[in-house]
Image (cartoon, rainbow, N blue to C red):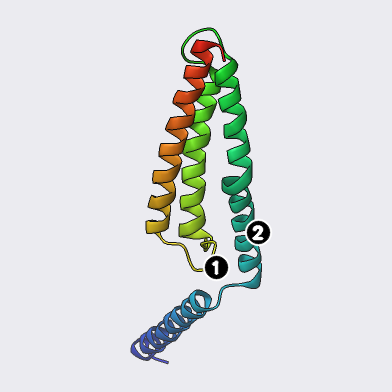
Amino acid sequence: MSKKHSRRLVSHNEKITAGNHKEAEKISQEEPNCEDQHNASSTGCLLRIFWMLVGNVVLTFCVLGIAQHRGSILSIADACFCVIVGFLLATRYFDIRHCGGTTTDGEPATLVHWRHYAMILGVVSMVLWIGAHIAAYYGT
């Protein structure tokens, strides 16, 4: 076999291999693996439990800690409160963007829903934080 003929053969085989890789990529993008779907749904479920339940319970304990603190203006409970609010926002965002987060009606959630959640969480958190500091100041 001549060099010219072997080069054509190698070039032809490279095109076929490249074509097979492209087809394999298309298939892998179109049909996610069942294990990936299971992991994504498990992760999404854990994220939803955090931002719907656990995070809000922790925020409640932080508010109680702030209200009972009589020392300086800011405490560890204040830092914890701010961190948890940030985690709640990040968790909900990640849930929507990467884990197929849904609304209470079962519709796919969008960034509009996230902005709405962020606005409500921000306002409610600020009111609770200020209220807890007022309660701490007046000793109620």
Q: Quadrant of residue 63?
A: top right
Which one is in front, 66 or 90? 66
Left-right relation of 61 to 112: right
User: Tag 2: Cα neighbours inside 10 Å, few (<14), some, or many (≥20)?
Assistant: few
Q: Nearer the viewer, residue 128 or 46?
A: 128
Q: Earlier in the sequence, mark 2 or mark 1?
A: 2
Quarter of image, res 140: top right
Residue found at the very far top of the displayed protein: 71
Residue occupied by mark 1: 106
Tell me the mark number nearer the camera, choosing from 2 and 1: 1
**What SS does tag 2 mark?**
helix
6 w.r.t. 36: above or below: below
Of 49 and 99, the residue lying toward us: 49
Residue 22's x, y, as percent?
Answer: 44, 79
Residue 11 drawn above or below residue 131: below
**Label 1 SS:** loop
Q: CA distance from mark 2 to mark 1?
A: 17 Å
For label 2, the residue is: 42
Q: Position of residue 68 (x, y in %)?
A: 59, 16
Residue kind at label 2, given as amino acid type: Ser
